[in-house]
Image (spheres, rainbow, N blue to C red):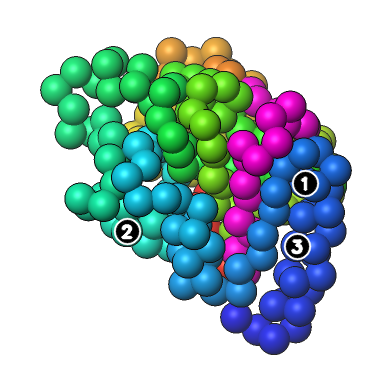
């Protein structure tokens, strides 16, 4: 990545990390995907039960491949015979891997969900939540974060899932009530009442959508 962009990202990440700390959440900055993977694994003891939602960023840094082995108990809902049971087991997991649709400069995390399994696990259940967040997700404020989630993340996800939503056709939010809409639940995480539960790894890269 360009040296000037990297320097800007380092400085901006420190601002976000300070904001997260003020909200009882822990932030980290990773200069590379490899550093992000190393930091994430340092937060996950061997033997942990691990679940996740649709976190593309966790895939992109190699984290999913790194924990999907005999060292950990990876709860793979895609391979489960009973997907509902697998999703319910998520709430009792030691670790939940997540990403963010957007995060503000002062540490507020924004996510939109269709089935609520992802946002509900972020809000409550798993003992520890680890966010992998590219610096492309950082926005000025909550209003900007919501706009990013609705006009960048949602249309791309609707397209990749092959859904018939207005945003999949136009590329921007139409505030729809389509049966296929993935903008059903909005989660704004502005504070964690449980110290040590939420960890955010900010990565000097473009990750996810």
Label 2 neighbourhood size at 10 Å, few (<14), some (14-19), many (20+)? few
Identity of the residue drawn at 75% across and 62% down = 13
Identity of the residue drawn at 74% across and 27% down = 193
Check residue 66 in the rendering and tell me which mark sits there, or answer none. 2
Residue of label 3: 13
In three-dimensional space, the C-alpha distance between marks 3 and 2, rounded to whole angstroms, equals 25 Å
- Closer to us: 18 or 117: 18
Q: Is residue 76 visible?
A: yes
Identity of the residue drawn at 80% across and 63% down = 14
Label 3 neighbourhood size at 10 Å, few (<14), some (14-19), many (20+)? many
Instruction: Give SS at disc 1.
Output: helix
Instruction: Give SS at disc 3.
Output: helix
Can you tell which of label 3 and label 1 is closer to the viewer?
1
The residue stretch that appears in magenta: 186-204
Check residue 20 in the rendering and tell me which mark sits there, or answer none. 1
Q: Is residue 170 above or below residue 125?
A: below
Identity of the residue drawn at 75% across and 71% down = 10
Check residue 2 in the rendering and tell me which mark sits there, or answer none. none
Instruction: Give SS at disc 2.
Output: helix
Q: Is residue 163 above or below residue 33?
A: above
Please give left or right for residue 155 compared with residue 74 in the image: right
In three-dimensional space, the C-alpha distance between marks 1 and 2, rounded to whole angstroms, equals 26 Å
Label located before the other in sequence (3 or 1) = 3
Label located before the other in sequence (3 or 2) = 3
- Closer to us: 165 or 63: 63
Percent x, y of residue 28: 66, 60
């Amino acid at each position: 990545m360009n040296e000037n962009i990297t320097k800007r990202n380092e400085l901006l990440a420190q601002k976000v990390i300070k904001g997260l700390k003020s909200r009882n959440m822990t932030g980290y900055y990773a200069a590379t995907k490899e550093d992000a993977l190393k930091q994430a694994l340092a937060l996950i003891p061997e033997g942990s039960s691990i679940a996740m939602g649709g976190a593309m960023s966790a895939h992109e840094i190699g984290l999913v491949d790194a924990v999907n082995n005999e060292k950990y108990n990876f709860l793979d809902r895609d391979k489960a015979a009973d997907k509902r049971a697998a999703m319910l087991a998520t709430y009792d997991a030691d670790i939940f891997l997540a990403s963010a649709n957007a995060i503000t400069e002062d540490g507020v995390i924004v996510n939109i969900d269709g089935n609520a399994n992802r946002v509900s696990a972020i809000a409550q259940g798993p003992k520890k939540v680890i966010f992998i967040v590219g610096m492309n997700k950082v926005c000025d404020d909550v209003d900007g974060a919501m706009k990013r989630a609705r006009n960048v993340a949602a249309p791309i996800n609707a397209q990749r899932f092959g859904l018939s939503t207005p945003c999949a056709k136009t590329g921007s939010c139409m505030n729809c009530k389509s049966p296929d809409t993935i903008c059903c639940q909005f989660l704004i995480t502005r504070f964690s009442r449980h110290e040590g539960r939420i960890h955010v790894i900010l990565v000097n890269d473009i990750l996810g959508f």
